Image: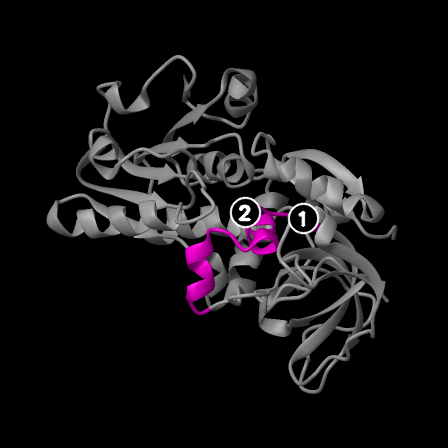
Amino acid sequence: MKAYVLGSYGSPDVLQLRDVDRPAPGPGEVLVRVRAASVQPADWHLMRGEPFISRLMPGPLGLRRPRITVLGADVAGEVAAVGPGVTGFGPGDEVFAMTAKGGGFAEYVCVPETELAPKPASLTFEEAASVPLAAGTALLALRDQGAVRPGSRVLVNGASGGVGTFAVQLGKAYGAHVTGVCSTRNLDLVRSLGADEVFDRTKEDFTRSGQVYDVLLYIAGNRSFAECRRVLTRKGVCVLIGGAATRWLQPAGHVFATLAASAFVPQKAVLTNVLACKGNRHNLEELTALIDEGRLTPVLDRVYDFEDLRAAIRYQEEGHAPGKVVVRVGQA
């Protein structure tokens, strides 16, 4: 099969399209013929090995070279084969998944059955591939860490990105009053997703608006926790999902500083990591139900051909994509 192999850290040029052995599904695994895969900020962080401090931590980044050689966490496609013990899927089933081990930037990938779910019937493969990590992150942030319920006030900082576009819609699905923060060019997009209010980050400082919220989803930017506390109720929660990146420390330094500071004040900061979440199949099924009800719709910015994966990652790395960037691996 064809796969983009990452042998060293660097620019998208280090990704080499090669012929490699097709994987065989082990016990509890499903071999998926990939039809589409989405490109995440995490992909270019892994590709570049940044921030450098992450190379000293347990995980996919080795000190001198990556431990994951084929990137791509989100996939949609068809079941090609199943391993021993798999009972919920069979060849030909249309599925989507988020795999913590990567491997999506290839024609085939093995996925644990617990990380797989039937593809929403109303979505194309490209749309389905955009859902698992971004929507799953928003789901955990709002449902589990923010405990959002009808009447909650939610502020989404970074509302036009991959996670943000899902977060705005999920917040409204849970009955919350949702305010989004984005740039001027994306104001109409965020409003179209159901946001009750929108701040233009180029003209307004959301931390000095005088309004307060039960939950702040902090997806983009480099605001300190002291600034974020201004917009939180006394028992409000700041859910950290991303932040401004630098080569050496950030956003890890910003995250650690925020988590440490929250230990001494009533408001709390928590970190969302959907890749560490168990039971992702149940989350995918919940998202599918919302999609089938018409309450959650993926926003695709650009769809690239598989041969143009490097260009897709370059575009994603610029950090201005409204919604999701997806790669089409094959046609059904």
Task: Name the residue at 66% across, 59% down.
Answer: 71
In depth, the one of 216 and 153 nearer the eye is 216
* Residues at marks 1 and 2 touching, judged by CB atoms closer than 8 Å: yes
Across and down, in percent, residue 324 comes to 63, 39
Would residue 39 be counted in the magenta stretch?
Answer: yes
Q: Label 2: how many residues lie within 10 Å, few (<14), some (14-19) or many (20+)? A: many
Residue assigned mark 2: 134
Residue assigned mark 1: 38
Q: Is residue 304 left or right of residue 292?
A: right
SS class, disc 2: helix
Where on the picture, by quarter, is residue 228? Answer: top left
Task: Name the residue at 52% across, 39% down.
Answer: 166
In depth, the one of 78 and 61 nearer the eye is 61
Q: Which amino acid does label 2 sit on?
A: Ala
Give the magenta range. Answer: 37-58
Q: Is residue 294 left or right of residue 253?
A: right
- Residue furthest to the top: 203
For residue 314, above or below residue 67? above
Q: Which colour scheme is used?
A: one colour
Task: Let me know if residue 191 appears in the view.
Answer: yes
SS class, disc 1: strand
Across and down, in percent, residue 135 comes to 53, 47
Task: Let me know if residue 298 appears in the view.
Answer: no
Task: Name the residue at 66% across, 57% down.
Answer: 72
Name the disc covering residue 81, or none. none
Quote the CA–CA distance across marks 1 and 2: 10 Å
Where on the picture, by quarter, is residue 148? Answer: top left
